[in-house]
């Protein structure tokens, strides 16, 4: 039986044609319009020589053009290769070359995207959306707006490509490149079934009470897409998962705490998903809960990194909405585990595996460790990638013993709820004792002056590694390194509290807002 991820939009046309699918400050687009433009772009791709299973790079910020191109590539039977809009030209060229992309869709003002395309001779066709001010586009570039225009000779999809391409469930739909913390980025191949079923799981807000009830994100629901759509979290949670059931995605190109609260009010947002730093930012808006009407907000999800318990408590108290903590990776499509809507009270827990997924806390030999003991989070089920593109050795290493090895250290309690302790590589070994940065960070966030915190290990002659905390303070608050050390000493065992504290203006963050520990270590 065939399955194409673009069925999400096809079903939207069939059942919700006149409902709003995409909201942007510049436009609103119905499901009928989204389907029409995606199909036209599919025709333009076919006319440009793109064949089924060909890879197409996609480098566009959170705008309607991203979603149109994404599903247009899928309609044509191609494979989407999303690119981080912050990449430099060399990194763009590497991704296009490594993925064997034959075409690229770029937001024209992103000069690095255009220059990177020019360095890859095998990537032959460029589609450019938007207007580049002083940048000369390569000869033969097709304007994206022309490709999706109603009267365009380029697309003419009705005669050239009248139907959605028939792909198989285990065909690759998207190649997501990992962050490359252990070397060159690797492309995780996610199938049409991986992503389709993950979108279904995101679309359903599940309740634990019996008989089991499910509320689906459908017409009337609106999600605020602050997470980058080129990232697995944003792509599945804020695009595919919302469009799956007929809800609307309101895109935001650049996250700002105050702007997010204003959008929640003006567009009556019902769902917000973000990384912890986004929740920090909204909490930092002076009198945010009084200045903005956020009463429409019903569901919040945090993922990408551990949400400090104190931040969760404050946000829920001030904005009167529960935060579900969830967990996943690019290689897991990404959702693997989540708290259910009415079981969010266990702070620090990521809940239980989603339907059809098995998770285990294992040792190095893939044996389950005792309840409550830390070990590596191992996952298997319908959400696991096919493998790393052209990396059989890396795939075999990640899939040892029939389980996907996440590289995260976690625990499972007696109720079957999971918690993430830390990344395996982030664990600090001080004098033979394991120190998990998250545990120390939880204490740091309890200090009234601390706005952001990250804990890393630094080399030490006697202990092997020493615990170092890097913190940023709230505006108008003060604290000295000695005061921070003394505070931690009261709440942590002697081998855990940081001996070194560095105070900075802000911590380095990735494109999703996730704090980059590797930069602090470097």
Image (cartoon, rainbow, N blue to C red):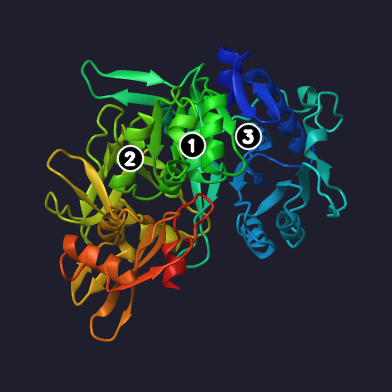
Q: Is residue 295 above or below residue 508?
A: above
Cα separation between marks 3 and 2 = 34 Å
Q: Position of residue 405 (x, y in %)?
A: 33, 55
Residue nearest the observer in this picture, 436 or 316: 316
Label 2, residues with CA under 10 Å away: few <14, some 14-19, many ≥20: some
- Decide which of tag 1 and tag 2 comes sooner along the chain: 1
Side of 165 where 340 appears, left or right: left
Is any atom of residue 232 visible in this view?
yes
Label 3, residues with CA under 10 Å away: few <14, some 14-19, many ≥20: many
Work out which quarter of the rendered image holds the C terminus and state it.
bottom left
Cα separation between marks 1 and 2 = 27 Å
Q: Answer yes or no: do the residues labelled 1 and 3 have beta carbons within 8 Å?
A: no
Q: SS for tag 2?
A: helix
Which residue bears the numbered disc 2? 314
Cα separation between marks 1 and 3 = 12 Å
Residue nearest the observer in this picture, 184 or 46: 184
Checking the image for residue 236, the label placed there is 1
**Badge nearest the viewer, 3 or 2:** 2
- Decide which of tag 3 and tag 2 comes sooner along the chain: 3
Q: SS for tag 1?
A: helix
Which residue bears the numbered disc 3? 67
Q: Residue at x 62, y 14 (%)?
A: 17
């Amino acid at each position: 039986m065939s399955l194409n991820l673009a069925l999400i939009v096809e079903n939207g046309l069939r059942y919700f044609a006149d409902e709003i699918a995409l909201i942007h400050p510049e436009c609103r687009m119905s499901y009928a319009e989204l389907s029409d433009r995606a199909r036209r772009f599919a025709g333009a791709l076919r006319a440009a020589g793109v064949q089924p299973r060909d890879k197409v790079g996609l480098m566009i910020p959170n705008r309607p053009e991203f979603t149109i191109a994404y599903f247009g590539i899928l309609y044509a039977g191609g494979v989407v290769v999303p690119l981080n809009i912050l990449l430099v030209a060399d990194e763009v060229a590497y991704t296009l070359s490594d993925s064997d992309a034959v075409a690229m869709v770029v937001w024209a003002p992103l000069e690095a995207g255009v220059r990177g395309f020019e360095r890859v001779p095998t990537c032959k066709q460029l589609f450019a959306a938007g207007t580049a001010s002083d940048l000369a586009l390569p000869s033969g570039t097709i304007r994206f707006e022309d490709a999706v225009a109603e009267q365009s000779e380029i697309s003419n999809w009705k005669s050239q490509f009248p139907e959605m391409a028939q792909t198989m469930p285990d065909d690759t739909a998207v190649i997501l490149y990992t962050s490359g913390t252990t070397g060159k980025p690797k492309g995780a191949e996610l199938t049409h079934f991986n992503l389709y079923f993950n979108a279904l799981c995101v679309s359903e807000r599940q309740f634990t009470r019996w008989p089991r009830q499910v509320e689906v994100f459908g017409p009337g629901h609106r999600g605020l897409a602050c997470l980058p759509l080129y990232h697995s979290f944003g792509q599945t949670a804020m695009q595919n998962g919302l469009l799956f059931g007929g809800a609307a995605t309101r895109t935001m190109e650049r996250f700002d705490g105050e702007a997010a609260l204003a959008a929640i009010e003006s567009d009556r947002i019902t769902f917000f998903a973000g990384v912890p730093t986004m929740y920090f930012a909204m909490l930092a808006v002076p009198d945010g809960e009084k200045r903005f009407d956020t009463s429409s907000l019903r569901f919040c999800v945090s993922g990408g990194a551990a949400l400090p318990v104190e931040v969760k408590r404050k946000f829920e108290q001030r904005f009167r909405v529960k935060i579900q903590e969830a967990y996943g990776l690019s290689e897991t499509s990404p959702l693997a585990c989540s708290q259910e809507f009415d079981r969010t009270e266990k702070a620090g827990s990521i809940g239980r595996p989603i339907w059809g997924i098995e998770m285990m806390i294992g040792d190095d030999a893939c044996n389950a460790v005792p309840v409550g003991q830390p070990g590596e989070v191992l996952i298997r089920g319908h959400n696991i990638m096919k493998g790393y593109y052209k990396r059989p050795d890396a795939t075999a290493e990640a899939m040892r013993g029939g389980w996907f090895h996440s590289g995260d250290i976690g625990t499972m309690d007696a109720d079957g709820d999971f918690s993430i302790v830390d990344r395996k590589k982030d664990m600090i070994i001080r004098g033979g004792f394991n120190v998990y940065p998250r545990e120390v960070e939880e204490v740091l966030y309890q200090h009234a002056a601390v706005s952001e915190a990250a804990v890393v290990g630094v080399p030490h002659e006697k202990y092997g590694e020493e615990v170092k905390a890097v913190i940023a303070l709230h505006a108008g608050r003060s604290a000295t390194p000695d005061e921070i050390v003394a505070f931690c000493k009261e709440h942590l065992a002697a081998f855990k509290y940081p001996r070194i504290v560095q105070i900075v203006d802000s911590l380095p963050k990735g494109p999703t807002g996730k704090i980059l520990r590797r930069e602090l270590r470097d």
